[in-house]
Amino acid sequence: MLLSLTVFIDDQCVLPSASNKCCDDMADLGPLDIETVSAGPNHVIGPDVELPVAGLWTFDVTARFGEFDQVVFTVEIPVSD
């Protein structure tokens, strides 16, 4: 299943394209790397996120605030067929 991922961060940060991951623990899948591209300040998109099965997916987004500080945001999203 193909979907699109959009991430906005309200605070000033740098969003690295290689630090976005998702997994489905019930199906024992992941973590899968999600490739993202910059879509403006504090905004990235993953236009072609391919998930192999429907289920409750956990998405981890790592946002860098400066050179050394980073925060991982986690959200669970139900994905249906």
Image: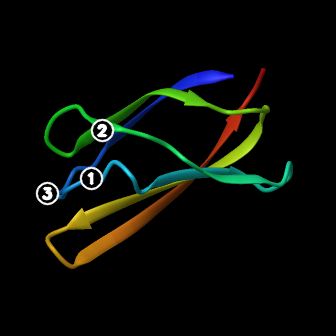
Classify 10 Å Cα crowding around label 2: few (below 14), some (14-19), many (20 and above): many
Residue 20 location (% of width, % of height): 45, 52
Helix, strand or loop for disc 3 = loop
Gap between marks 2 and 1, in whole Å? 7 Å
Which residue appears at 35% of the width and 70% of the height?
71
Horizontal arrangement in the rendering, residue 71 relative to residue 67 (left or right): right
Considering the image in quadrants, where does the C terminus appear? Answer: top right
Viewer-side label of 3, 2: 2
Q: Which mark is residue 7?
A: none
> Total marks drawn?
3
Front-lying residue, 53 or 7: 53
Q: Earlier in the sequence, mark 2 or mark 1?
A: 1
Q: Earlier in the sequence, mark 3 or mark 2?
A: 3
Q: Quadrant of residue 56?
A: top right
Q: Which residue is mark 1?
A: 15
Residue 36 location (% of width, % of height): 37, 38
Vertical side of 50 occupied by 10: above or below: below
Q: Amino acid at mark 3?
A: Gln
Which residue appears at 70% of the width and 53% of the height?
30
- Mark 1 and 3 residues: CB-CB less than 8 Å, in contact? no
Q: Which residue is mark 2?
A: 44
Helix, strand or loop for disc 2 = strand
Q: Amino acid at mark 2?
A: Val
Q: Amino acid at mark 1?
A: Leu
Horizontal arrangement in the rendering, residue 50 relative to residue 12 (left or right): right
Considering the image in quadrants, where does the N terminus appear? Answer: top right
Vertical side of 34 occupied by 14: above or below: below
Which residue appears at 20% of the width and 46% of the height?
42
- Mark 2 and 1 residues: CB-CB less than 8 Å, in contact? yes
Vertical side of 1 occupied by 26: above or below: below
Vertical side of 36 occupied by 66: above or below: below
Q: Which residue is mark 3?
A: 12
